[in-house]
Amino acid sequence: MTAKNVNYSPELTQKAIDLYQEGIALEQIAEAIDKSVRSVRSKLVREGVYVAQPKQTAKKSDEPTKKEIMIELEKVVPFDTDGLMGATKACLLTILAHYEQ
């Protein structure tokens, strides 16, 4: 029977945990213990200490959405707008500006 290859010694595991609990970034911990960020994150998860960072949500833009532009276009153009669904927002805004003059 072959011996199991141990990637993390108890000391290395404790060092990773201590650094993480001190608020050190995963990238820096990985560099300090010569492991990949993914490996460090996985080890911290298995040890029950890793807390996932909240995902950033996209900011709501002040620009109108493509759907909002299409609704405005339908109000002012003298033709069917169904064929414009594949157009870019910039193109739709140009058409809208032309017909709102």
Image (cartoon, rainbow, N blue to C red):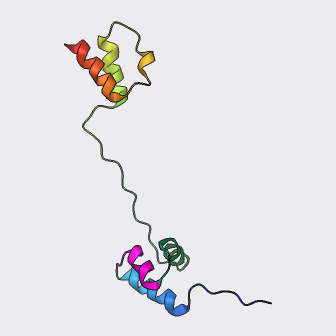
Q: Is residue 26 above or below residue 101?
A: below
Task: Name the foreground residue: 94 vs 52.
Answer: 94
Location of residue 10 by image quarter: bottom right
Q: Is residue 79 above or below residue 56?
A: above
Q: Is residue 96 above or below residue 42?
A: above
Identify which residue is drawn at 29% across, 18% down.
Answer: 95
On the rendered structure, is 4 left or right of 31?
A: right
Please provide percent x and percent y for residue 23: 34, 78
In the orientation shown, which residue stands out farthest toward the bottom?
Answer: 11
Identify which residue is drawn at 39% across, 84% down.
Answer: 19
Please provide percent x and percent y for residue 62: 24, 37
Please provide percent x and percent y for residue 72: 30, 19
Residue 69 among those drawn in magenta: no
Please provide the residue range marked out in magenta.
23-33
Residue 24 among those drawn in magenta: yes
Please provide percent x and percent y for residue 83: 45, 16
